Image (tube, rainbow, N blue to C red):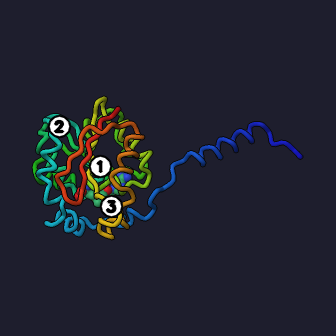
C-alpha cells in the first residue's frame, strides 16, 4: 500500500481533529424568528404587559446595581428597552453596547437612544459564535432571555469572558424550565434549565456570586469572571 506524504497525512489529521473539537450547533432553528425581524412587531412581544421581564424591568435594573461610568453589554438587546434604561443609569461617562445578531434590532435601538437624547449607546451586530467586543472592554454583560438563543454557547461564552475586564460580571435572566411544571411552550423552546445553564457557564470560567428569586417564571443569576 502506498503511503501518503507526511505533510498530507498531518494536514488530514489536523482537519479531522479540528472537526471533532468544533462546537456543534446546539439549536439550529432557535433564531429563525429573528431573521430580518420586524421591530414594531417584536416590540409588541417583548414590551408587553404580562411579560414578566417587561413588568419587572425596573426591579431588574435596580438589581444590576449599575455605577455611573461603567461599560455594559446588553447581549441580545432585541428592541433595546433595557439598553436605554441602562444608558440613563450609567450617565454620559458610561456606555452601553447594544449587541444583537439582528441588524434591524441594533439599528432601531441606536436610533431610539438618539431620539431619547442618549449618545452613550453603541450598536454591535455580532454573529452566532462571538459577541464581537474587544478584549477587556466591558464591566458587565447582561443577558435577558438570550442565553437559550445561543447556538454555540461554548464559543459565545468564551467571547464574553474575553470581553469582560478583570473582575467583570455577567447577569443571566432566563426561563425556569422544570419538566412536569413549566408551560409546554417553555419546555419546547428553552434548551436548558437553570442547573444546566449554570453548569455550562461555570465550565466557561465564571463563578456564581448571586442568585435571586424575585420572579415567578424567570431566574436571575450573577456570575463573576474567574
Ligand atoms: C428573546 S429575545 C430577548 C430580547 C431582549 N433581551 C429582551 O429581554 O427583551 C432574544 C434576542 O437574542 C438575540 N440573539 C440570539 N442569538 C444571539 C447571539 N448569539 N448573540 C447576540 N444576540 C443573539 C435575538 O436576535 C433576540 O433579539
Number of residue marks? 3
Label 3 vs label 2: CA separation? 38 Å
Q: Is residue 154 above or below residue 81?
A: above
Q: Is mark 1 within 8 Å of ligand 1?
A: yes
Q: Nearer the viewer, residue 100 or 139?
A: 139
Indicate the secondary structure of the residue bearing disc 1: strand
Task: Specify the quadrant of the image occupied by residue 184.
Answer: bottom left
How packed mark 3 is, by other alpha carbons closer than 10 Å (few <14, some 14-19, many 20 or more), is some
Q: Residue at x 19, y 59 (%)?
A: 216
Q: Earlier in the sequence, mark 2 or mark 1?
A: 1
Q: Earlier in the sequence, mark 3 or mark 2?
A: 2
Where residue 75 is drawn, which disc sits there? 1
Question: Dividing the image into four equal quarters, which quarter contains ligand 1?
Answer: bottom left
Residue 209 placement (x, y as % from top left):
26, 37
Residue 10 placement (x, y as % from top left):
71, 38
Q: Residue at x 77, y 37 (%)?
A: 6
- Is residue 13 in view? yes
Q: Residue at x 44, y 60 (%)?
A: 27
Disc 1, disc 3: CB below 8 Å?
no
Indicate the secondary structure of the residue bearing disc 2: loop
Q: Horizontally, is 143 left or right of 129 in the view?
A: left
The mark lying in front, picked from 2 and 1, is 1
Where residue 122 is drawn, which disc sits there? none
Label 1 vs label 3: CA separation? 25 Å
Q: Horizontally, is 159 left or right of 2 in the view?
A: left
Q: Is mark 3 within 8 Å of ligand 1?
A: no
Q: Earlier in the sequence, mark 1 or mark 3?
A: 1
Q: Residue at x 80, y 39 (%)?
A: 5
Indicate the secondary structure of the residue bearing disc 3: loop
Residue matched to label 3: 178
Residue matched to label 2: 94
Amino acid at each position: 500500500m502506498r503511503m501518503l506524504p507526511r505533510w498530507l497525512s498531518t494536514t488530514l489529521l489536523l482537519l479531522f481533529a479540528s472537526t471533532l473539537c468544533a462546537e456543534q450547533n446546539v439549536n439550529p432553528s432557535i433564531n429563525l424568528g429573528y431573521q430580518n425581524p420586524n421591530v414594531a412587531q417584536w416590540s409588541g412581544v417583548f414590551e408587553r404587559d404580562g411579560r414578566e421581564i417587561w413588568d419587572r424591568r425596573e426591579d431588574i435594573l435596580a438589581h444590576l446595581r449599575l455605577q455611573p461610568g461603567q461599560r455594559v453589554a446588553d447581549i441580545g438587546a432585541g428592541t433595546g428597552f433595557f439598553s436605554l434604561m441602562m444608558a440613563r443609569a450609567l450617565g454620559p461617562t458610561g456606555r452601553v453596547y447594544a449587541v444583537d445578531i439582528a441588524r434591524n434590532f441594533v439599528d432601531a435601538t441606536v436610533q431610539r437612544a438618539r431620539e431619547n437624547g442618549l449618545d452613550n449607546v453603541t450598536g454591535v451586530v455580532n454573529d452566532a459564535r462571538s459577541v464581537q467586543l474587544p478584549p477587556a472592554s466591558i464591566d458587565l454583560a447582561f443577558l435577558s432571555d438570550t442565553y437559550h438563543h445561543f447556538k454555540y454557547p461554548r464559543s459565545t461564552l468564551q467571547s464574553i469572558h474575553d470581553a469582560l475586564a478583570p473582575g467583570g460580571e455577567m447577569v443571566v435572566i432566563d426561563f425556569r424550565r422544570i419538566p412536569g411544571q413549566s408551560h409546554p411552550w417553555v419546555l419546547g423552546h428553552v434548551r436548558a434549565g437553570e442547573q444546566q445553564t449554570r453548569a455550562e457557564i461555570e465550565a466557561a470560567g465564571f463563578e456564581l456570586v448571586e442568585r435571586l428569586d424575585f420572579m415567578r417564571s424567570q431566574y436571575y443569576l450573577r456570575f463573576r469572571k474567574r
